[in-house]
Amino acid sequence: MNRIIWVAGHVDIASNEMADKAAKDAALEAAAWCKEEDNSVKIVQEVKTHIRQGIIADWQRSWNVQVEGRFTHSLIPSVNTKPMRTNFHRTTDIKFNRLQSGHTLLPSHAHKLGFTATDLCSCGRDKDTIAHAILHCPIYTKPRETLIAELEAIFRKANTPFHLSTIDISTILGPNEDLPPDVRLSIRKATGRFISASKVKI
Ligand SMILES: [Zn+2]
């Protein structure tokens, strides 16, 4: 059987006072340590951010001065550009990526590599460059008209001024980072429909 008995409090007992003080000191030390731990986490995060910013800045400097890839640089000048998910059909996706990279099967590029005898478009009007195929070639007039009409509707819906003269390769193939994400995605999808409908060999 247990007996409950009264014992004197430890107030004024020297050893107990010392134990109390030691416990309080330990608690304060632990609190300070925890605070330092928080600071350590913050410092690690700041260092990580700093390293990441440094890597991106180096990458950007390199991207700005490289000799290769200037066409892509004109479309996507910032290395920090976020990719867009479009759910294109795989063929359209491949063609879109080729267009952005500037490495296509169009005669202007294939001729440089020795794959075609000429760099002229089969329409006979000009060199078959990406700009010619998308913006000017009469072979793709119909899908281009649809693309322009879609772009006009997208810009109108977004209350963004639309001028046909300002629609260029950057608008059609670039990330358009100055526009809201939904507008950018709509433009990208319209471009995908043009690539698909025109059946342009890229
Ligand atoms: Zn042509």
Image (cartoon, rainbow, N blue to C red):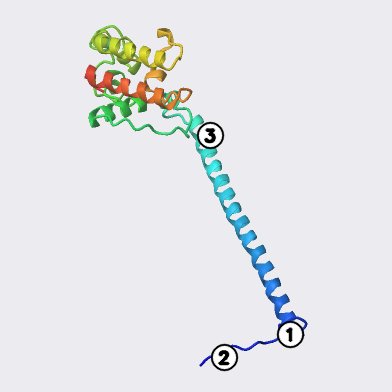
- Find the distance from the CA under tag 2 to the CA under tag 3: 81 Å
The answer to which of 144 and 30 lies nearer the viewer is 30
Q: Is residue 68 left or right of residue 191?
A: right
- 45 to 23, vertically: above or below: above
Assign a secondary structure to mark 2. loop
Of discs 2 and 3, which sits in the foreground?
2
Which of pointers 1 and 3 lies earlier in the amino acid sequence?
1
The answer to which of 19 and 120 lies nearer the viewer is 19
Name the residue tied to disc 2: 3
Indicate if the residue with disc 1 has its beta carbon within 8 Å of ligand 1. Answer: no
Q: Position of residue 27 (x, y in %)?
A: 66, 69
Residue drawn at (26%, 27%) of the image? 92
Q: Within the displayed image, which quadrant is ligand 1 positioned in? A: top left
Total numbered badges shown on the rendered structure: 3
Of discs 1 and 3, which sits in the foreground?
1
How packed mark 3 is, by other alpha carbons closer than 10 Å (few <14, some 14-19, many 20 or more), is: few
- Find the distance from the CA under tag 1 to the CA under tag 2: 26 Å
Q: Amino acid at mark 2?
A: Arg
Q: Amino acid at mark 3?
A: Arg
Name the residue tied to disc 1: 15
How packed mark 2 is, by other alpha carbons closer than 10 Å (few <14, some 14-19, many 20 or more), is: few
Which of pointers 2 and 3 lies earlier in the amino acid sequence?
2
**Residue 191 falls in image quadrant:** top left
Of discs 1 and 2, which sits in the foreground?
2
Q: Is residue 106 visible?
A: no
Q: Amino acid at mark 1?
A: Ser
Name the residue tied to disc 3: 61
- Find the distance from the CA under tag 1 to the CA under tag 3: 68 Å
